[in-house]
Each structure stands twice: as structure tokens, then as C-alpha cells.
Amino acid sequence: MAKQRSSIITQGHSRAPNRSMLRAVGFGDEDFNKPIIGIANGHSTITPCNAGLDQLTDAACAATKSAGGMPQTFGVITISDGISMGTPGMKYSLISREVIADSIDTVANGQCMDGLVVIGGCDKNMPGGMMALARLNIPGIYVYGGTIKPGQHNGNDLTVVSVFEAVGQYSAGKLSDEDFQAIERKACPSIGSCGGMFTANTMSSAFEAMGMSLPRSSTMAAPDEEKTKSAEESARVLVEAIKQNIRPRDIMSKQAFENAIAVIMAVGGSTNAVLHLMAIAHEAEVELTLEDFERVRARTPVLCDLKPSGRYVTVDLHRAGGIPQVMKILLDAGLLHGECIGITGQTLAETLADIPSTPPAEQDVIRPIAQAVYADGHLAILSGNLAEEGSVAKISGIKNSCHTGPARVFESEEDALAGILNDSVGAGDVMVIRNEGPVGGPGMREMLSPTSALIGKGLGDSVGLITDGRFSGGTYGLVVGHVAPEAAVGGTIALVREGDSITIDADQRLLQLNVSAEVLAERRATWQPPQRQLKGVIKKYAGLVGSASRGAVTS
């Protein structure tokens, strides 16, 4: 077995007080020679994403003990993106990613733990926990709390995004009061994270692809018994990984990140994956750039017909074979690095050896390569004078890949939503939502309310939208986020004026403000950064956070 970090508190008379403290929480004489395994529990009744995690924590604790480890549990915060969406509370969502990573780092190092099970559900639990695992580099595994089951109304599957879109439909007079109320009541029928291929399910899929979670675990439904069994198996696998000294940075190689990007492209995942994978890579000391995403995108087809732009939800993907089936198709096509190892000690090729090369014939959630939903990936990196450091666009399902129109400038998400609902935005316009970046927000809010309202109003194909903020994993349409440099630090997006011509060209990967360099220089000479009164954690964050083009990290 690898040398245990916790051995410093189990040896010698000078450490007797440490032993005594541990006896008070259940340690016996025989337990002091066992690896101490931290179990970071993200349980919370703030959100359905995390409401079932206590059960998984209990299962992981019991399995750890039976496998010869000594578990120690501790709590981890969460913010519910779905509940805070469209409010000032959403400013704290991305901040929580850093707080989660830092808190796990603090406890695991402060208590000299030998291994770590991270159990999380909501969007920022995922990258925050994985950032901590990469930073700590002690044997670790991620246990995802699982997806919610879909709601049903009039024969249609519902997700939380259905409610946001219903706001726009209701405002446009396209939805009755009765149907609007029914959708709100039925959209979230169980515990679990938002049910489409939104951010939580995207990141869980990425973690499985990287080998940091068990095969098939990323698409299980939160209420199902197999989710608890998977938590138990995860703990047992981690104890063995400690014996074999398999560490996160042994797993999280550049090739493993490329595997994760390929899977995200194949399942039609969230734009947030770009931001989060770059942040995780930063902690793992792996050089990952926006150009890597574009390179993998160009060669990887979209294989899955999943919401938000497709028809199916994550439980449908699970029934069709889940991430292993998607990965086997990609591996056979030479689009994955099969030599990468996972937490089980097996290579990816070994893990997928018994998976069929073709998806089941009786379903169309997962397509074979020859019948791909799209020939190449959906997350494109756009650049130009409006995004000199780059930006991220989800280009799947859009009818118009190139759009030029007059700018409608909004200084916040709230102003933008009001503009849509009061019909101030019309077909052909390009909405600009600025001062919502990592520094400018602060916190880089997700623009789900305005983008969903556009869809609900029937403007999703005729109005472009760009922002230095983020998008929910539930967003689709002609939208470009993560524009960098952001407005608050003087990026070109800060210089856009009402009526300026803007071009969004997905084919040419271009985001262009059609204003001369001379005019922009004149505007820049008189530009002043916004003045804000900040305090507390949001002030600390604004002073530390870097560009979205590098993951919006604070370290």
C-alpha cells in the first residue's frame, strides 16, 4: 500500500491527543492503521439536485468500512442555479465553484486524508469537486448524485428549462394560464439534477469519460437503487486505488481531457463545460486551451439527440447504453485515446471491451457514426475584434449560421429580459448583454431567462445574442457567451453602441463588430470602468478572478 498521509496522526506518543479526538468520533485501536478517506457530502435541501446525497454518503461510508478504509464525512455547500437563475443570487453560482474547491482542499489537507470521495449534484458541485481532486492529487473518485426524472404534460417530457420557455410563450400569448401552471407544477417530479444534457449531466458525462467516475454512473437517475449501489462500488474502488496509489493526475492527462471534450461534443453538452474543463485542467497542471476544444470539435460528430436542442432526456440516454455506448462508438472511429487509465486501473479500451460497437437498434437516442445528428461538434470557439481572447457558441440546431444585425445593448440580464418581454427586441436584432462577466457581474451569471424568453417568443432563430456572461446548459439558439475580454476590463464588448452592426458567423468562427478601428479607438479613449460597491465574498472574487478564456479561475 502507498504511504498514508494520515500516518502522522497515528504514530508515536506525541500524537496521542489526535488519537483521542478520533476515538470520540468512532475510531477503535484497529482503525488507526487504515487509510482515512474523506467523504465530501454535498447534501442540501436547497435544491432537488442535492436532496438525495445523504443516502449516497451513508452507502459510501458503509462500503468504505467494509473495504478496509476509515471514512470521515464533511459537508460541502451548494447553490441552486435553477432557483437563483434570473436573480442577483445567480452572481454567487460560479463563486460557489471556487468555494467548493477551496473547502474540500482545506479539509482534506487539514485532516491529512489518504483518499477522497466527492459526492455532488448541482452544476458547480461538479467542477468544484473535480478541481479539488486535481489540486490535492490524492486518490479520489467523483460520485454524481444523478439526474432527475422528466415531468410530463400533454405527452411531452418536461425539464426545468420547459418552465423558463413557458414564460416567453405565456408572455407572447401562445400558452394558456392553465397550461402554464401545469408545466410549472409538473416539470420537476423527483430529486436529481436537471434532466436534459444540461451542465450537471454534461460534467458527469465528462468525468466518466476521463475515468474519474465509474462506468455508467453519470446517467443514472437519482431516485433509482442503482445510484446507491454505484456509490457503494465507488468507495470500494477508491480503497483499491489507494492501495495501488492511483492518483487523479495519473488519470487526468491531456489525452483524458481530449476524451472528455469528444464525449461532450458527441452528447451535445453544455457550453459551461468549456469553462469548467479549463479550470480543472488548470488545477491538474495540464495545458488546455480554447484551440483544443475547436480542434476536437472539428473531428467529433454529435451522436445523441438530447435536450435542450434535441428530443430526449438523460434517462433515455442511460437506457440506450449511456456514456459507455457513446464512447465505444467514438473509440472504434479512432476519436478517443484508448490507452488512458481510469480510477479502476483499467485502460479505457479495456473498460469498453464488452460494449457493443453499434448502439441498440430499437432506439434513436444514440446514433451510429453514419447517421450522426451533426457531422461535427456543436460547441464552437468564435473570435474576432469583439472577442479577441475568444468566445463560445452552441451551434447545433441553429437555422441561420451567419447573422448580421443592429446591436440592442443591455447593461444587465434584467434589462435584457424586460426588453424581450416588452417587445423592444425584434427579428434581425443582435442583443448585447454586458457587464455580466466574471469580474463585471461579478460572477458571470447564466442568461437562461432571456434566452428562454426569446425561444418562447418565437425569436430563437431570428435574434442573435452575445454576452460576456454564461449560458445555462439548457440554452440553445443563435447565442454566443464567454466573450473575452469582458466589458468590465475594457474588452471591445464595452464599446458597442446601440445600432452598431454586429456579425455572428458560426461557419467562419467569427464574432465581429463592424465599426472601424479608428472609431473604436476614440470610444476606448473615453471609456470608464463601471463603479460598484462590493463587499464580502463577491468582492474577494471580483479581485481575484481571471478571464473566461482561461476558465475564470482565482488561483
Image (spheres, grey):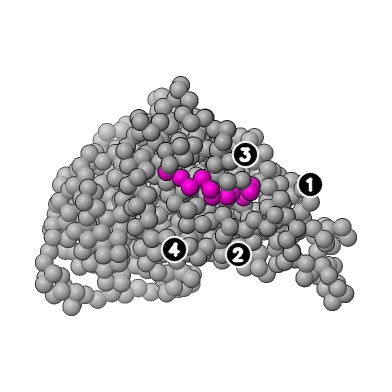
Q: Secondary structure at mark 2?
A: helix
471 in magenta: no
Instruction: Give coordinates of residue 253: x percent, y percent.
Output: 51, 57
Q: Is residue 6 above or below residue 337?
A: below
In three-dimensional space, the C-alpha distance between marks 1 and 3, rounded to whole angstroms, equals 19 Å
Magenta highlight range: 335-345
Q: Label 1: which residue? A: 66
Is disc 3 surrounded by few (<14), some (14 to 19) or many (20+) residues within 10 Å? many
Instruction: Give coordinates of residue 484: x percent, y percent.
Output: 30, 64
**Mark identifier at residue 227:** 3
Q: Label 2: which residue? A: 136
The answer to which of marks 1 and 3 sits earlier in the sequence is 1
In three-dimensional space, the C-alpha distance between marks 2 and 1, rounded to whole angstroms, equals 25 Å
Q: Mark 4: which amino acid?
A: Glu
The answer to which of marks 4 and 3 sits earlier in the sequence is 3
In three-dimensional space, the C-alpha distance between marks 2 and 4, rounded to whole angstroms, equals 18 Å
